[in-house]
Amino acid sequence: MRTVETVADLRYVVAKWRTAGERIALVPTMGNLHEGHLDLVRKARGLADRVIVSIFVNPLQFGENEDFAAYPRSEVDDSEKLIGVSTDLLFMPSVAEVYPRPQAEQTRVEVPGLSDLFCGASRAGHFVGVATVVCKLFNMAQPDVAVFGEKDYQQLLVIRQMVQDLCFPIEIHGLPTVREVDGLARSSRNGYLTDEERSLAPAIYRQLKATVGRIQQGRRDFALLEEQALSNLESEGFLPDYYAIRRARDLGEPGPEDSDLVILAAAYLGKARLIDNIRLSLD
């Protein structure tokens, strides 16, 4: 596996692959890799001849009081893991390489509407930061395909909309959430949980499954189901941010004709902000 830190070096390698007629996949990450990330790389390996993984903790998607400085970084361990899943190239740029001008002067990319809901409502500017850095990474690496996890379901929809609107010739693939044995979605932020909080954390997934069960039994009073779920999470020790039943394609309010749904949840447990979701089809 080759590691590069500059756009020039990245493009030099990509140009050689292009000349050889090879198909290229990109897996953007913020590092501190876990099995979920490695599954993304394995998926990418099946979709392309060459796989690039980027590790970049993006300051533009963190709010003023969020954990950019404390976000876990483990580059040496990450590199070893990526070698183990046959990554061809690791791109680890500095902040100055990605944003050579001051952030206040940085050109930004916004996907209106989708970016203002749920995580976007509670984390002002978050999805502008996500869309901007992913747009830049796409321009830097020029992949044929990119792979993202479905745990960040709203993020996945934002990226798909951006790719469509800006006419990127890139296939976007989502990969189902990778979970621990007890159901907790794997996340770099799980490391913030104390032992006691870690034992409580799977309750968010249990609540999602319980809501799925009630809908499958015929419940369609979605607003009441959301209220009940929020109350249940509070009683389990969470500080809920949101809990919503929405159309899977665009996160709109589901109507009687909508059969493809997603249930989204976000809640704080101690220092950790946990997000999760479940898709379901009424067909």
Image (cartoon, rainbow, N blue to C red):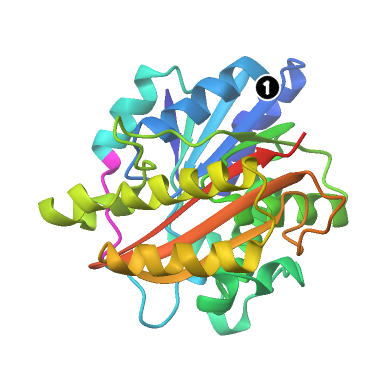
What quarter of the picture does the C terminus occupy? top right
What quarter of the picture does the N terminus occupy? top left
In this view of the protein, which residue sits in the foreground, 52 or 280?
280
Q: How many dots with numbers? A: 1
Assign the magenta stretch its main secondary structure: loop
Mark 1 crowdedness (10 Å alpha carbons): few <14, some 14-19, many ≥20: some
From the top left corner, tell me how far across and down residue 34 is, in percent: 34, 36
From the top left corner, tell me how far across and down residue 169 is, in percent: 84, 39
20, above or below 257, in the image? above
In the image, 221: left or right of 239?
A: right
Q: Which residue is depicted at the point 19% across and 56% down?
A: 197
Q: Is residue 71 magenta?
A: yes
Q: Is residue 55 magenta?
A: no
239, above or below 26, in the image? below
Give the magenta range. Answer: 70-75
* Circle 1: element type: helix
In this view of the protein, which residue sits in the foreground, 71 or 8?
71
Q: Which residue is depicted at the point 77% across and 16% down?
A: 21
In the image, 213: left or right of 266?
A: right
Q: Which residue is mark 1?
A: 17
In this view of the protein, which residue sits in the foreground, 229 or 266?
229
Q: Quadrant of residue 125?
A: bottom right
From the top left corner, tell me how far across and down residue 264 is, in percent: 56, 56
Residue 68 appears in view: no
Q: Residue furthest front?
A: 218
Residue 98 appears in view: yes
Q: Which residue is depicted at the point 67% across and 46% down?
A: 218
Q: Which residue is depicted at the point 65% across and 61% down?
A: 131
In the image, 259: left or right of 261?
A: right
In this view of the protein, which residue sits in the foreground, 61 or 91?
61
